[in-house]
Image (cartoon, helix red, strand yellow):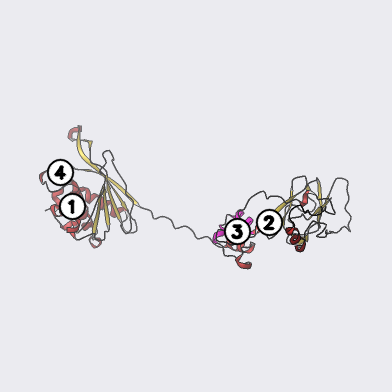
Amino acid sequence: MDVLMPQLGETVAEGKISKWFVSAGDAVKPGDNLFEIETDKVSMEVPAISAGTLATIHVQAGEVAPVGAVVAVIRGKGETVSATSSPTPLTPAQAGVQSPEKKELDSRLRGNERLESRKPAVTMEPFREVRTPARNYGPARLPGGTVVTPLARRLAGEAGIDLAGIKGSGPHGRIVARDVAAAHKAPVPAPTPAAATVVLTADIALGQALALCAEVKEIELADVIMKAWATALAHAMPSEQSAIALAIGKERAAIRAADSKSLTAIAAARRDPDAAGGKPDTSTAISMSDVPGIISIAGALQPPHATQLSLGAPRRAPVEAPHGSVTFIDMVTATLVCDPRAVDAALGAGLLAAFKGFVERPVTMIV
């Protein structure tokens, strides 16, 4: 049985075989894809309609043949193939291809005028029917107007390549198969890994800090926390001191040189940022939860900050007292997040330990 080049459209007189799915000598059955055809407007796969062996292939991949040409021969059981058989293409008229002049005449017909019924000189076989591809590889025209050939769409779809990032080298900027192949071979830059962070946590007793706030009515726990953190930074990283950003719920403040200010001065600057000299650039940040029941939080580092200190809501927690008894104290959990490129784990642990000491014994940072 001869396998013919199918009719792909009224004005298409030839087709290009872009790929063979089987080789000469392979057994085929109805429905098996034999080859793929490509034109400027469509690509399609041609299946076998009879069982047998693919005896010969007359048109190889990459070659063009006219409509109706014998591109291959399938030999059924007991059949023989003549060694002299060669592809015999149909004429455009036999294949049902209209000339441009005839199409123009047809378009002028109106009313009850009808074209004389024409029948193709040969019986059309299933090979001639335009077949929808098994997969849809996207539109032939991108949103920006760039045209993509069918083969380029298929190659891009199979390789997972975004056509929007390819510059076409074909006529009028058309994206062709070689453009997709070049993009597929291009090295893909490795994603930049996210910077790792060092996270440290400590429970801090608040008894003395709260007692100090109760005695000095002008200050609050936030002022003690800010001075304790600024003092810890000044001891461990004196060259990195600038300003500290503080966030408590919706409250925001940024205070310079908090380690050298008194607690009352810090309280005044926190309540009136404009009086403190505006909003300076900060190198670290403190966030305090004002939601009861939130034991701990770990804030994300915000560049250019190298450290982020976060505190949960103060709570009453049981601790072991002398002689093995249990007592309840005021406590807060502090979490320190560090950028290891500036503050490694050892330095971060020292900072958090110093901060814990200043909060638990605030007198040590004000004398």
Cα distance, mark 1 to mark 2? 71 Å
Q: Nearer the viewer, residue 329 or 303?
A: 303
Q: Residues within 10 Å of mark 2 (few under 14, many from 20)?
A: some
Marks 2/4 in contact by CB < 8 Å: the verdict is: no
Residue placed under numbered mark 3 in the picture: 141
Where in the figure is residue 72, as x and y percent of width and height? 81, 55
| Direction top: furthest residue | 325
Identify the residue at horizontal 63%, vertical 67% (top origin). 171
Identified by mark 3, the residue type is Arg
Q: Along the polypeptide, which appears first: circle 3 or circle 4? A: 3
The answer to if 35 sits in the magenta stretch is no
- Which mark identifies residue 220? none
Where in the figure is residue 237, as x and y percent of width and height? 24, 59
Tally the numbered discs. 4
Q: Nearer the viewer, residue 55 or 169?
A: 169
Identify the residue at horizontal 15%, vertical 57% (top origin). 261
Marks 1/3 in contact by CB < 8 Å: the verdict is: no
Residue range (magenta):
152-166
Q: Along the polypeptide, which appears first: circle 1 or circle 2? A: 2
Q: Nearer the viewer, residue 167 or 146?
A: 146
Residue placed under numbered mark 1 in the picture: 271
Q: Residues within 10 Å of mark 4 (few under 14, many from 20)?
A: some
Q: Along the polypeptide, which appears first: circle 1 or circle 3? A: 3
Q: Nearer the viewer, mark 1 or mark 3?
A: 3
Residue placed under numbered mark 4 in the picture: 208
Identified by mark 4, the residue type is Gln
Looking at the image, residue 98 lies above or below residue 136? below
